[in-house]
Amino acid sequence: MMRTNTCGELLKKDIGKKAALAGWTHSRRDHGGIIFIDLRDRYGLTQVVFDPKHDQKTHSGAEHLKREDVIAVKGKVRARGEGLENPKLKTGEIEVLADELEILNKAATPPIEINDRLDINEDMRLKYRYLDLRRPIMQRNLELRHRAIKAVRDFFDKEGFLEIETPMLAKSTPEGARDYLVPSRVNPGKFYALPQSPQLFKQLLMVSGCDRYVQVVKCFRDEDLRADRQPEFTQIDIEMSFIDEEDIYGINERMVKHLWKETLGVDINIPFPRITYDEAMDRYGSDKPDVRFGLELKNVTDIVKASSFEVFTKVIKSGGIVKAINVEQGSAKFSRKDIDGLINFVGVYGASGLAWIKAAENGLESSIVKFFSEKEQKELIKKLNAKKDDLLLFVADHKHFVVNTALGALRVHLAKKLGLIKENSYSFMWVTDFPLLEFDEDLQRHVAVHHPFTSPKDDDVKLLETHPEKAKAKAYDMTLNGVEIGGGSIRIHKREVQEKMFKALGISQKDAEQKFGFLLEAFNYGAPPHGGIAYGMDRIVAILTGNESIREVIAFPKTKNAESLMEGSPSEVSDEQLKELNLKLDIVKK
């Protein structure tokens, strides 16, 4: 037996026992001829002592050990000397006095430090990911990810769900992002697509009578990347038959409660609050509002529409709005230079400017106050609950979306800057009643807010043919601390309604048959009412581990350029491989 215990297992109760350990040399210290090795595996650290007076052979072997050498040792567990205990280590009360040492593998000097205390360049971490993953913090991330996925599977198993695998090679169907295409060698000129989600397959499983489906599944999207996106990512995918929104809310709240309890030991209160999309945008400027702090948006359009401040009145006359947030005690915290920085900040979100007013002892102060009557100023003070030293920030635009998103992003920015966000708290929320469609200026047509298979509200089906932009969806997102962690909907299950949806999206009957004919045909044979939700598993684990980037919780992630620095993918392939696939590249090499 190479080891009897792990390096995180031996405790005070084991003193006097013989133990065999194996792992990596984490550190080596030589104190007065006695060598101390911190031996590391994924379970922890154990101090191993090589004393020449106890065993000269093992001591001589330990003299040549370097960081990351792989070794096995045998010896007796003993108490550390009085006052030499390490309370930071689980094994900090004991050490192993080595009788035997076997060097299993010598290690070259590692190009990165196997140390949680040092900041390491991310590109280097990704290039040597197999070394980066040795770091205890990364080991803990992977362990928590495992426990989270197990908790999800255990929960749904008890609820009667079946985990059913769906194809990785499928038909290319438009679902919002670009597909990753896979050429078929046996069908020249034809391609599979890697799934952006199992959406159509899980709906077909509902038609098949598998009324409770779940899958922890890989999905693929060829889109621009950022910290919370990867070309391949993991979803918790769920679908249920004969249900409505209330069924979805109930079972998913219980799942999240179970997940947080099993992984963090935290009790989450259910049911979660609910807010409509319209209210979320109006109050928070976001469809994934962070409600851990105030700074809510207030609509002051009616108050300022008759003022002589043309910046506001011109916008209002063109159908626009004016909104504001009150930064309590902000006038004492923000200089003019700081405010100029906030102006630049909202500009990123399309706002043409940011007006500001300070609340003083005797009213409002700003270069623009003169444009507002005394009555208007009093109404602003009342509407914004302005008190002495508060800072009032205004955005006006003819596009309501610009006002909401600019101020919504600003409130989060200010909350972080001012330390208003309560850390280690979890504010879950359902956002409901999304618009079914939105108009895409570039495409000059309506597109689905969620996806083309989302059901409109029952009373809004008729709007698909007359005013599709007014239709509301049976759609819902679960948000947490300003992040969308899951989204779903009740699906369309009748062919005639699905065809109306395709028509509203500008998809011709011919294209609908070509791309989705198999789904439409399945609806002919008795599709039950059904709906579901999908969660970003990587994003959830990132939140559970306190990380902002999902790359920290994926074993082998890609960079922001969708590259793997470790094995060098994507890479060129040989001419022979291309010939087998009947492909010829038309690329000018730089």
Image: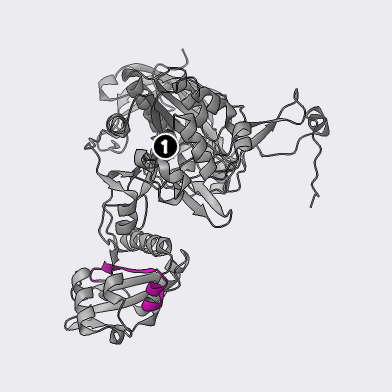
Classify 259 as above or below 464. Answer: above
Give the x, y percent position of residue 327.
Answer: 27, 68
Q: Secondary structure at mark 1?
A: loop
Q: Relative to 124, does residue 53 appear above or below in the rendering?
A: above
Residue 88 spot, x, y in % from top left: 30, 38
Q: Residue pushed farthest bottom?
A: 370
The crowding category of the residue bearing disc 1, from other C-alpha atoms within 10 Å (few below 14, some 14 to 19, many at least 20), is: many
Name the spot of residue 156 as percent of width and height, x first.
Answer: 35, 23
17 horizontally vs 341: left or right: left
Left or right of residue 245, residue 129 in this image: right
The foreground one among 104 and 140 is: 140
Question: Height in image: 471 above or below 238?
Answer: below
User: Looking at the image, which residue is at 35% across and 26% down?
Assistant: 151
**Figure coloring:** one colour
- The magenta segment: 313-329
Question: In the image, what residue type sits under mark 1?
Answer: Ser
Quadrant of residue 43 in the image?
Answer: top left
Residue 245 within the segment the image draws in magenta = no
- Residue 232 visible in the snapshot: yes
**Foreground: 212 or 133?**
212
State the residue position of label 1.
455
Dividing the picture into quarters, in which one does residue 521 lie? Answer: top right
